[in-house]
């Protein structure tokens, strides 16, 4: 019964900033990793950033130095601070989490939130 709900997407001008949030809820025993993926029209879904339980992070090369992922463990929430946005960042951003519930360990996905970077 796990749900991931994203928020914070929208339209922004090049060079602007957005902060995405994703809150996990439900029968959660533990969360091993949370992250953000994105998919632009006609392209494969790609990993943007991920943070694991011990706090280590990894980023796509295309966003290093511009995006920062963080997590509030008490709230089961992950954030993606996106700065210096470029038109190439335009995509649907999906929250992902590897979660153990009372019945299984599995990847869960949010519905996605759109980000459009345009003048």
Image (cartoon, rainbow, N blue to C red):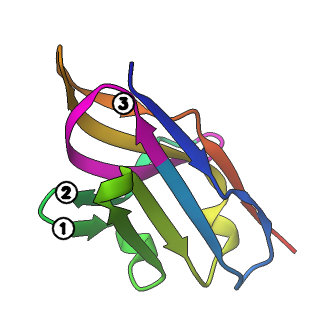
Give the Cα separation between the discs numbered 1 and 3. 19 Å
Q: Residue at x 51, y 44 (%)?
A: 94
What residue does disc 2 label? 52
Report the span colored magenta: 23-42
Q: Which of 96/91 is in front?
A: 96
Q: Which residue is mark 1?
A: 55
Q: Earlier in the sequence, mark 3 or mark 2?
A: 2
Judge left or right: residue 107 versus residue 64: left
Q: Residue at x 59, y 40 (%)?
A: 112
Q: From the top left corner, tell me how far across and down residue 44 is, in percent.
A: 48, 41
Tell me the quadrant of the picture where the N terminus can be found.
top left
Looking at the image, is 7 positioned above or below residue 64? above
Q: Quadrant of residue 101?
A: top left
Q: Secondary structure at mark 1?
A: loop
Give the label on residue 34, or none: none
Helix, strand or loop at disc 2?
A: strand
Q: Quarter of the image containing the C terminus? A: bottom right
Q: Is residue 34 visible?
A: yes
The Cα atoms of the two marked residues, 2 and 1, are separated by: 5 Å
């Amino acid at each position: 019964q796990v749900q991931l709900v994203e928020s914070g997407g929208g339209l922004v001008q090049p060079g602007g900033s957005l902060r995405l949030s994703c809150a996990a809820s439900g029968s959660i025993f533990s969360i091993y990793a949370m992250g953000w993926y994105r998919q632009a029209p006609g392209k494969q879904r790609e990993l943007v950033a991920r943070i694991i339980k011990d706090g280590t992070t990894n980023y796509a090369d295309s966003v290093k130095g511009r995006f920062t992922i963080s997590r509030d463990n008490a709230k089961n929430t992950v954030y993606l601070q996106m700065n210096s946005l470029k038109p190439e960042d335009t995509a649907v951003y999906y929250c992902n989490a590897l979660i153990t519930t009372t019945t299984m360990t599995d990847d869960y996905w949010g519905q996605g939130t759109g980000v459009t970077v345009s003048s």
